Image: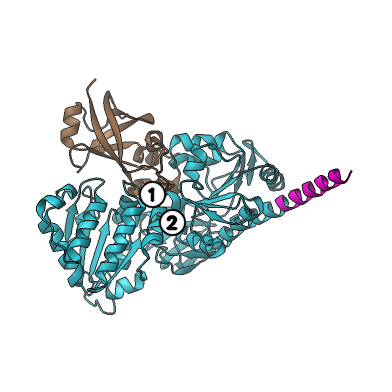
Amino acid sequence: MQFEHIVCGFCGCVCDDIKVTVEDGRVTGVKQACALGRAWLMGHSTESCNSVALVDGEPAPLDEALDVAARYLASSRNPLIYGLSSTVCEAQRQAVELADLLGSNLDTCASVCHGPSGMGFQYAGDSTCTLGEVKNRADLVIYWGANSAEAHPRHFARYAVMPKGLYRPGGRKERTAVVIDIRPTATSRLADLFLQIRPGRDFEAIWALRSLVRGIPLDESSVAITGLTLAQLQDLAQRMMACKFGVLFVGLGLTQTRGRQLNTAAAMLLIRDLNAHTKFALQPLRGHGNVTGHDQVIAWQTGYPFAVNFGRGYPRYNPGEFTAVDLLARREVDAAVIVAADPVCNFPRASSRYLSEIPTICLDNHDTDTTKAARVVIHTGTSGINVEGTFYRMDNVPVRMHKFLPSPYPSDEEVLSEITERVRQLLAARKEANSHAANH
Amino acid sequence: MPEIKLLLVVGRILKQGVGISMGKYTAEYREAVSTLEMNAGDMTALGVQNGDEVELTSPYGQTCVHCKSGNLPVGMAFIAYGPPTSDLTGTETYASGMPDFKAQDVVARALGGGRD
């Protein structure tokens, strides 16, 4: 059977033009996807796990696993809910309800991705656009600290540089692509201009560009720290001011290095300066398929994009205090719910090690280092393959994910909803018991 | 054994991204996340060749990877995100939630053995 307009949920591009062939309940063919999308569709279309749930490493009925999970959470004083960036917004919304009920911490993969970009926008504002506007209008496309060719393989070809657009009918011929990075990459080889800056000097390079765009004279010695010459920076500043529609795509090269949120705030201020000359926008290149959706859902429900704590009965926000890496490193949480993420594989070891010391409940469709560390594992269907719902593309455009294969596993939303209900009952029973004891 | 100081940069590569979906316990994924790209001159200074095993030590941990020559500046090395990089990364986030994934000072030491 052939399916068209299937949406890939691997990365933030959320490409919605994929063709899939299904035979005997498995994906056997994928067209138009990149290597990452093909692997995502092929790798998630079969059940790699034998049991729907595990408790202490042993297969268990779903009902028992839900009960054990609810008991762990109801008896926790300061739990953490983390991940959720590869699941649908409907499940993310349910996670917020659970966090609110528990008074827990709620953090997403954004905190080790573009969380600092969100913080930068809070400092400096956000001049953005959709990828459709980039395709139709952009004549200058800059990637800074991003290897899009390997992390978002269709970004260059489908959205940003290659496609023919309404006001760019010549496609690639009408665009200039610039890459700024600390090393040559697969992306820099595709660019018209590659500027290799010194590691950890992004802020200084951005600030030098701001000076040039604002007409403040600089000399060679003042920019030497960036690893670029004054002539290179002047050329780039001139290209930025002279273009008709420019877009700066920023990657983790800005958020995972010295400066972090100050780098993206500086980049945003540069964009603000450029808009005195022309139209310019900035976009973070989001990694996980629906990490942008989680920004939306949490911001809609709490006012904050990540690093939220409900401990006082209302949402508080503080990166560094309520972010997962920090909470685990300081051993401040006493239980964890990990949804569609693998922090044991990716977090600093001193943080991830702690997950195996506390009751960890993991919802995932694959066996991972985190499911191995968890006391309760519930295998769930894959969003966009077994589960329908909403993803947000990296430019904040919502895209409906289709379900085209059945799964024996429940959805993340169903599991989180059921855990929430069971926790609610346990907390109500405890409150009643305490009230009864106080009256006697 | 000779050793040199390197700035370790961590990032995404296509094989690692494919491995996330095809299985993190596949040989392809494990190889993708345990291959260290280095400047050819640094490899000569360290006395290693493509496929040789290198021990990396940071202030936060230690791991062993296999090296290969890559297009990198002198003194810089690259490896894809994965368990070996987690062993080397500290938990300081400077009140941002984000560890120093892309700027870790490490000491590389040649171990001699090559990849099977």
Colour of chain B in the rendered structure image: brown
The picture places residue A320, in percent across and down from the top left corner, at 46, 46
The one of A436 and A338 positioned closer to us in this rendering: A436
The picture places residue B88, in percent across and down from the top left corner, at 37, 34
**Can you see residue A9?**
no
Range shown magenta: A423-440
Q: In which quarter of the image is the C terminus of chain A?
A: top right
Is B106 included in the stretch rendered in magenta? no
Identify residue type, mark 1: Gly
**Rendered view: A71 above or below A203:** above
Residue lying at the far front of the rendered structure: A216
Instruction: Please tell me whether mark 1 sits on a helix, a strand or a loop.
Output: helix
Colour of chain A in the rendered structure image: cyan
Identify the residue at image location x=16%, y=59%.
Answer: A193
- To which residue does mark 2 refer? A10
> Main SS type for the magenta part?
helix
How many other residues sit within 10 Å of disc 2, few (<14), some (14-19) or many (≥20)? Answer: many
The picture places residue A426, in percent across and down from the top left corner, at 75, 48
Instruction: Please tell me whether mark 2 sits on a helix, a strand or a loop.
Output: loop
